[in-house]
Amino acid sequence: MKRQGLKWMLALLAAGAILFFSRDMIREGEVPETTPHGTGADAVAVELAPVRIGPMRLLRTFSGTLAARSECLVAPKVSGRVEYLAADLGDEVTRGQVVAKLDNGEFVQAVAQAEADLAVAVAGRTEAKSSLEIAGRELKRMQTLKTKGVSSPAQVDAARAKHLAAEAKLEIAKARVLRARAVLESARIRLGYTTVAAEWQGGDTVRFVAEKRMSHAEMVPANTPLLRLVELSPLTGILFVTEKDFARLVPGQKASISTDTYPGEVFSGHISRIAPVFDEATRQARVELEVENPGYRLKPGMFARISVVLDRVADAVMVPEAALAKRNGRQGIFLVRLSGDTVSWQPVETGIRQGNFIQIKNTDISGQVVTLGHQMLKHGSRIRLTGQSAESRTN
């Protein structure tokens, strides 16, 4: 019995000791309670930092890719064997430059034949014109003889019929000349198609060969691409944004672009187009940028980090992010009172984060805030400074 009583006594003593040592401890999330100033409670060692006012910006960095703003395929309009190819992979090509020639033997022959056919048609027209003149004179002669009573009306009618036939033959000859000229022009155009030039509308006057699809001496069907050309300046940056950032983006907004290819270098650009719809699968909207590309150093297909300033505040109230604490599920800060040795708990609404600082939106505060040691604080707690200035930790 004595042993059992001794055990109960030891258990009660242990429980009392636990309650004694834990009565002043504050758990994270516990409602802070006021400690009157001037009590004998020990001061909590803390570090402080001043509340600052200055410009802040919300900078968001997106993952994107670079693409050619425009590209075109160079293809012959007629089939033939590649006799000459003047551009290769990576070559610079100017608008209108001849990049290929096809074997033109058959097309030269077609032009010669068309020229001969035109000559025949012209000769036929001349013959028909002469026949018309002869028929006209004959008709006039018959009409004169009729007035003298020498020729009969039937002879005059026959002469008139021959004259009308001659007129019709001349019209036919003229039409044949026009047709022959059209055939000749078509043959010359097709001959011209054997010389392949790089042509495109708008954009830069210079493009680069991104792909070579045919080689020398290969047979190429009509309208089969020989080369693929891309425009390298400016490039198009492509990124996708969620609903959270969509409303903050507008055309013309400036952006900074960096790549792994050129570490430490930043390229300039601006938003050029924003899609009016979200993709139902990803719930993201496509945004395109115009990216400057001096020296054509950036290439389509490169991965890019695109940074855009989404918001700016000229005179933001800011504190070090380390000053934020939680009590009762709410976010706030411990603000040093005017006395300098006690603190007040102040719930806050945060805004822009920039570096180690965060914007305080819902209250106008000044003075100093606790950045280290607030785990042991509550509203009205006494404080004492450590040896190290807290400002050095936030700079």
Image (tube, rainbow, N blue to C red):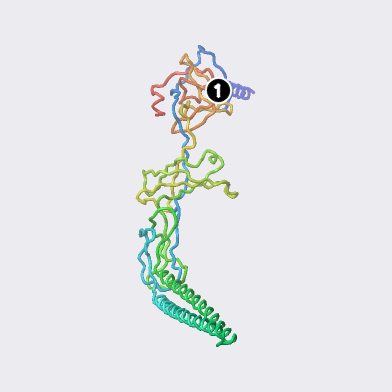
Pick the front one: 362 or 371: 362
Element assignment for label 1: helix
Left or right: residue 270 compared with residue 347: left
Placement of the N terminus among the 4 image quadrants:
top right
Residue 321 at least partly seen: no
Question: According to the image, label 1 marks what residue?
Answer: 22
Where 13 falls versus 71 (above or below)? Answer: above
Please, is residue 35 above or below residue 243 in the view?
above
**Picture quarter with the C terminus:** top left
Residue 33: give x, y in percent of width and height.
57, 19
The picture places residue 383, in percent across and down from the top left corner, at: 47, 18
Q: Relative to 170, does residue 18 appear above or below in the rendering? A: above
Q: In which quarter of the image is residue 97?
A: bottom left
The answer to whether residue 39 is left or right of residue 304 is right
Residue at the limit of the structure toward the front, as seen here: 148
| In the foreground, 67 or 109 | 109
Residue at position x 49%, y 16% in the image: 337
The amino acid at mark 1 is: Ser
- Counting from the top left corner in percent of width and height, residue 21 is at 54, 21
